[in-house]
Amino acid sequence: MSQLSAVKQQLASIGNDAKTTAGGLAGFKTKFSEAVNQVQATIGGSAQGVDKDMIQTLQEAEKQVNAAISALQQASQAATRFASSL
């Protein structure tokens, strides 16, 4: 197998793995978002300031999960396109 074919296969594999991982994270994000909403509903009105910190931390994590999903989807598309062009 030529080096070009090997690179093409590796890129295709990376593209598929990134797509699969993004899909898994999307499923996790749904459950995580539900948990964040439940926590917010439960502790959101407490008199302690730590509830706000906890909710903000969870919401920031949720944003980062969204960013990871987006980055993996973009990486998948880029790797697949590049592999196809070889």
Image: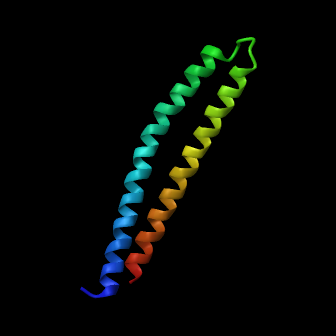
Q: Is residue 13 left or right of residue 67?
A: left
- Residue 37, quarter of the rendered image: top right
Who's the residue at 50% across and 32% down the image? 32
Which percent across, then down, holds residue 54? 66, 26
Tell me the quadrant of the picture where the N terminus can be found: bottom left
Q: Is residue 53 left or right of residue 25?
A: right
Who's the residue at 41% across and 51% down the image? 21
Which percent across, then down, holds residue 25? 45, 44
84 vs 33: above or below: below
72 vs 84: above or below: above
Q: Is residue 71 left or right of residue 14?
A: right
Who's the residue at 28% across and 88% down the image? 2
Which percent across, then down, holds residue 29? 49, 38
59 vs 19: above or below: above
Q: How many marks?
A: 0
Q: How is the image coloured?
A: rainbow
Tell me the quadrant of the picture where the C terminus can be found: bottom left
- Residue 83, quarter of the rendered image: bottom left
Who's the residue at 49% across and 57% down the image? 72
25 vs 80: above or below: above
- Residue 48, quarter of the rendered image: top right
Instruction: Determine the residue located farthest toward the left in the rendered image.
Output: 1
Instruction: Determine the residue located farthest toward the top in the rendered image.
Output: 47
In this view, the residue in front, 20 or 57, is 57
Q: Is residue 66 left or right of residue 50?
A: left
